[in-house]
Image (cartoon, rainbow, N blue to C red):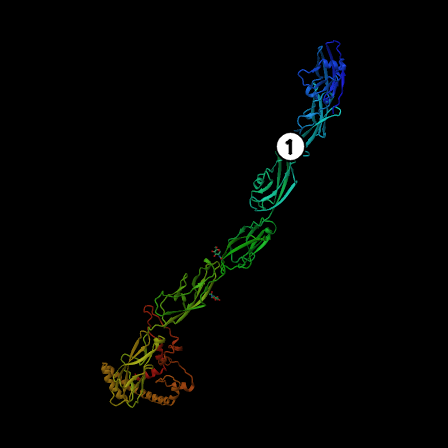
């Protein structure tokens, strides 16, 4: 607002030619405003002005002022701005000349322009910015732009204010040149984190009336200083992770915050534990704070990890925290079995509960995954005891028997109770060592061996075999012939036993006719200590060979004697002439004799019973038949090959002894007996003729008796024996047989059924073996005995004949 302050300074120069007046007017007066009454002041009336053609000369300056001649006043022609006109220069004046003519007069007019407060303080820019670090110290000064006010003097800037004045205070310093230095002084620390931008308003006030002001917006950007350390969100982080988690598994993500901005707020994370192990296992992402597993976790090695972590900003401030990582167990360990001690072999007589092996088992897993139970395969006689925690002993459950099982594979299986359960096993091989607890056992309880007589000595007869269930030496069986005697001779002279093989050899050649069987014992003994043995009876049966020809007992073949059977001419058909009696000391088939007529004087007259050797007439005897009949009978046994004997039977067909005698004289002549013999023969015939007749009487009487009893005899199928001793009839009468007659018992007609039994007589006679002759019997004593028996009926007859 402008206010006109007309100030009239009248300086009158009393020289007529020159006058000088000064005035003072405020600037900014309206056009047409009165500056001064120049005419009046200079004493000039308007006529003079008019006549003098008064004019204003302003030199080169613009025409701010005009002259109104009628009124004799100076008026504002152009608005005057002091600031334009003079700027800072004071005082500011317009120098004008008023020139009059007729006469010419010059007046100097000085118009001082006075300032009015028409300009407000003004800042060059309405806004200014500061970047101030929050770490700026108190008292730091920041120079502010000064405001400019074109006015001068009191209208110039008088004061500044800064709002708000929390952090900063204004400091105005007057400088030597009169100007002012405006500064902003930090009064209170900046905190970017609290206020990162401060807006201030700087106001410049002048002293005009009214006061004008200029404002400038000051924006203070509080620059971050790294005044804040990063701060972890937690002082302890906790996480769990299962062991054996794959690499790359994220364990946890930690975070820290930093109130600082920019790079000061950029946090990098690090694991601060220097232990290598940890850095091998875990890695933290520098930027994200994610902890990643990079190694293998084993619960059994470490159950918990404490990782010290650090967060650091770019300014080097840091915070630390820790992560507790619990490892959860996974049943990843099978029980570990360790054999502490074991026996590879135990003796089969070890008592039960004998400890075979000690084992320890360990499962590093925890809880049920680490609880272990051990078992063994159940088909074996062992058991496993948990002796102490984690220690097991394997013991025998029952007494062992190597012969049942000599080796055991004991599989110990230990399993934990985890889900799924893990197990491991170990197999022990246990040998059962042998104890000589089994005696040899013969394959059979007794043996019978057959040996054909006339064997070569040394022949292996038979093999006995005993088995021993034990092992090796304890099972090495040797065979021993036990001492005994056979017929008074040590058995070792009969047989020998091969100790190793059990082969029984005949030591000598056997003769069936001498010994038919014998027995002995063989002992089998093992090689144990002490040895065990068992024995067995071996019965050796000698088998017959047809090594003996039949022996003709009757009729006796004497060298020179004349023996003939008498056949009466009245003899009927089937008259029993005689009976050829033969024995064969062999047995069975070999002693089964058959009789055949080999040669005969008259084949039509006689026949020989094939089985019984009875010579009978085939037809009735006629007178034509020669007295002297000679029959050759061959006795054959049934052996292979068969052996035979021949016997010549002389038959006299005659009614009377002389007839016979006459005939047999020729007969003897035929036989070329010498003459002396003839004499003795006749004499002998004469002597025995009586006895012969007596004998005939006896025979006839027996025949009659036999005829009466024939029916009984035939029914009983008893063999028909033609000759009976005189006392034979007694046997029927008393039923007591007083003597045993071999030829009776050797029933040749029934020899298949029975061997020849020598009975009481024969049994006393020993068959004598001649070692030089292979088994040939020299003589059969028993046959003699039969003949030597004084009461033998045969002998009676022979004697008669002789
Ligand atoms: C024990 O194992 C061995 C070897 O595997 C085998 O030869 C033997 O026959 C087994 N013994 C038994 C009694 O199973
Ligand atoms: C033969 O064995 C039997 C049992 O079989 C025994 O009684 C006997 O004493 C043994 N004989 C010898 C001589 O060892």
Percent across and percent down for residue 667 are 24, 83
Percent across and percent down for residue 391 are 58, 51
Query: In which quadrant of the rendered image does the C terminus lie?
Result: bottom left
Left/right of residue 76 with respect to residue 439 in the rendered view: right
Residue 503 visible (yes or no): yes
Percent across and percent down for residue 59 are 67, 15
Left/right of residue 759 with respect to residue 6 in the rendered view: left
Left/right of residue 97 with respect to residue 304 in the rendered view: right
Q: Residue at x 64, y 42 (%)?
A: 237
Q: Nearer the viewer, residue 475 or 67?
A: 67
Q: Nearer the viewer, residue 694 or 409?
A: 409
Percent across and percent down for residue 18 are 72, 10
Q: Nearer the viewer, residue 579 or 423?
A: 423
Residue 143 visible (yes or no): no
Question: Dot 1, crowdedness within 10 Å: few (<14), some or many (≥20)?
Answer: many
Left/right of residue 203 with respect to residue 496 in the rendered view: right
- In the rendered image, the vertical position of residue 109 relative to residue 265, given as above or below: above
Quadrant of res 355 = bottom right
User: Which residue is label 1 attached to?
Assistant: 226
């Amino acid at each position: 607002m402008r206010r006109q302050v007309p100030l009239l300074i009248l300086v009158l120069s009393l020289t007529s030619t020159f006058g000088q007046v000064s005035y003072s007017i405020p600037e900014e007066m309206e056009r047409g405003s009165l500056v001064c009454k120049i005419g009046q002041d200079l004493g000039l009336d308007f006529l003079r002005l008019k006549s003098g053609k008064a004019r204003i000369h302003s030199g080169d300056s613009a025409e701010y002022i005009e002259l109104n001649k009628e009124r004799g006043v100076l008026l504002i022609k152009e608005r005057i701005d002091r600031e334009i006109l003079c700027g800072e220069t004071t005082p500011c004046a317009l120098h004008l000349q008023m020139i009059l003519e007729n006469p010419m007069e010059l007046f100097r007019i000085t118009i001082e322009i006075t300032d009015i407060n028409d300009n407000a303080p003004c800042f060059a820019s309405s806004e200014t910015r500061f970047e101030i670090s929050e770490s700026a110290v108190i008292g730091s000064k920041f120079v502010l732009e000064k405001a400019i006010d074109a006015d001068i003097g009191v209208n110039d800037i008088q004061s500044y204010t800064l709002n708000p004045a929390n952090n900063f205070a204004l400091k105005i310093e007057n400088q030597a040149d009169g100007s002012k230095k405006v500064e902003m002084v930090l009064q209170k620390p900046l905190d970017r984190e609290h206020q990162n931008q401060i807006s201030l308003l700087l106001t410049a006030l002048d002293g005009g009336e009214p006061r004008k002001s200029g404002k400038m917006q000051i924006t203070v950007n509080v620059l971050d200083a790294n005044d804040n350390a990063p701060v972890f969100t937690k002082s302890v982080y906790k996480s769990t992770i299962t062991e054996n988690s794959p690499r790359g598994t994220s364990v946890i993500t930690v975070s820290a915050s930093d109130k600082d901005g920019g790079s000061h707020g950029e946090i990098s994370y690090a694991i601060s534990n220097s232990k290598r192990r940890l850095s091998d296992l875990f890695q933290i992402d520098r930027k994200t704070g994610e902890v990643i597993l990079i190694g293998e976790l084993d619960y059994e090695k470490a159950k918990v990890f404490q990782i010290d972590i650090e967060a650091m900003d770019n300014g080097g401030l840091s915070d630390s925290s820790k992560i507790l990582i619990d490892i959860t167990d996974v049943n990843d360990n099978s029980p570990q079995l360790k054999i502490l001690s074991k026996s590879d072999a135990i003796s089969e007589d070890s008592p039960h509960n004998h400890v075979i092996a000690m084992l320890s088992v360990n499962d590093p897993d925890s809880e049920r995954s680490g609880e272990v139970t051990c078992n063994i395969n159940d088909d074996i006689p062992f058991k496993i005891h948990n002796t102490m925690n984690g220690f097991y002993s394997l013991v025998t459950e029952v007494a062992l028997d190597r012969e049942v099982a000599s080796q055991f594979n004991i599989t110990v299986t230990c399993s934990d109770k985890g889900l799924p359960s893990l197990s491991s096993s170990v197999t022990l091989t246990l040998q059962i060592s042998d104890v000589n607890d089994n005696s040899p056992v013969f394959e059979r309880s007794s043996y019978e061996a057959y040996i054909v007589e006339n064997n070569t000595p040394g022949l292996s007869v038979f093999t006995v075999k005993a088995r021993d269930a034990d092992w090796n030496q304890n099972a090495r069986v040797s065979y021993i012939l036990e001492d005994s005697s056979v017929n008074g001779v040590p058995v070792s002279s009969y047989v020998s036993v091969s100790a190793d093989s059990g082969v029984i050899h005949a030591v000598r050649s056997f003769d069936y006719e001498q010994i038919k069987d014998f027995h002995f014992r063989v002992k089998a003994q093992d090689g144990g200590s002490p040895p065990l043995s068992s024995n067995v009876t071996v019965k050796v049966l000698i088998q017959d060979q047809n090594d003996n020809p039949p022996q003709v007992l009757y009729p006796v073949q004497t060298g020179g004697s004349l023996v003939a059977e008498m056949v009466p001419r009245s003899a009927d058909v089937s008259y029993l002439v005689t009976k050829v009696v033969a024995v064969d000391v062999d047995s069975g088939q070999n002693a089964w004799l058959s009789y055949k007529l080999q040669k005969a004087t008259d084949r039509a007259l006689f026949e020989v019973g094939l089985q019984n050797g009875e010579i009978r007439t085939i037809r009735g005897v006629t007178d034509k038949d020669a007295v002297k009949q000679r029959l050759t009978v061959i006795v054959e046994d049934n052996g292979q090959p068969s052996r035979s004997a021949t016997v010549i039977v002389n038959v006299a067909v005659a009614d009377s002894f002389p007839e016979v005698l006459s005939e047999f004289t020729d007969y003897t002549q035929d036989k070329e007996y010498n003459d002396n013999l003839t004499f003795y023969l006749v004499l002998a015939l004469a002597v025995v003729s009586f006895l012969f007749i007596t004998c005939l009487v006896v025979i006839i009487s027996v025949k009659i008796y036999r005829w009466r009893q024939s029916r009984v005899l035939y029914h009983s199928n008893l063999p028909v024996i033609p000759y009976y001793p005189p006392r034979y009839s007694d046997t029927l009468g008393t039923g007591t047989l007083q003597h045993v007659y071999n030829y009776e018992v050797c029933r040749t007609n029934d020899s298949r059924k029975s061997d020849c039994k020598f009975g009481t007589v024969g049994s006393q006679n020993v068959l004598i073996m001649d070692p030089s002759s292979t088994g040939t019997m020299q003589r059969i004593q028993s046959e003699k005995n039969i003949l030597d028996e004084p009461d033998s009926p045969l002998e009676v007859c022979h004697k008669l004949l002789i």
